[in-house]
Image (cartoon, helix red, strand yellow):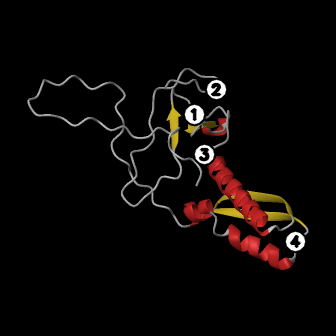
Amino acid sequence: MSTAPAGGAPAADVTAAPIPAPGFVRSAAVVATSTDEDHRVDIRSGHHRLAADEPASNGGADTATTPVGLLLSALGSCTAITLRMYAQRKQWPLRTVRVHLGYEKGPDRAVRITRRIELLGDLDEAQRARLLDIAERTPVTRAVAGGTPIIAAGPALPTTPPAPRAPSAEPTAAPTAAPTAEESPTHA
């Protein structure tokens, strides 16, 4: 499959990360591709296309949000979606969820994320408290706050076809392909 990212040349064929280890089920898969010499990265998550870049002050062209902006976007959207789903299931009168996030740098390279949640609607105090409690346990909140391990998933895929091998007398097994990002579920 060859597709053209917005404003760019066709992207090379890519596959998602290798098949998950036993006991794990992949709930999302993303392919991030950096080409040329600039900082822009084209991102494919399922059939959705995103991009990341750095501001000009950091050597980028400021054509998209920063990777940290994407992280905050993931946290904010997961928080809002989870609270909306919970309120709908409980049939609570939640009209709007607005999540304000900040990424702050401190002394000695310390960093933190601040989050303020606005809940608009005719909710009582117990409902508001429950929603704020739920916000602390969303999938992305847990991944970020819990320090989800990042595991090297194997060697990089070859960029050129391997050289032909000399014929062998031993039979070889047919290769199995890893699922593409389109075949992998993308929502946690």
Measured as percent of width and height from the top left, residue 110 is found at 58, 63
Q: CA distance from mark 2 to mark 4?
A: 42 Å
**Residue 54: quadrant of the picture:** top right
Q: Tag 2 or tag 3, which sits nearer the N-term?
A: 2
Q: CA distance from mark 3 to mark 2?
A: 18 Å
> Which of the two discs, 3 and 1, sits closer to the camera?
1
| Residue 20 shows in this picture | yes
Q: Is residue 164 left or right of residue 123?
A: left
Q: Where does label 2 land, which residue?
A: 6
Q: Tag 3 or tag 4, which sits nearer the N-term?
A: 3
Q: CA distance from mark 1 to mark 2?
A: 8 Å
Q: Where does label 1 land, which residue?
A: 42
Q: Where does label 3 land, which residue?
A: 67
| Type of amino acid at the residue the image marks with label 1 | Asp
From the viewer's perspective, is residue 89 above or below residue 19?
below
The reply to whether the C-beta atoms of the residues labelled 1 and 2 are less than 8 Å apart is yes
Q: Where does label 4 land, which residue?
A: 123
Q: Nearer the viewer, residue 121 or 60?
A: 121
Callout 2: SS: loop
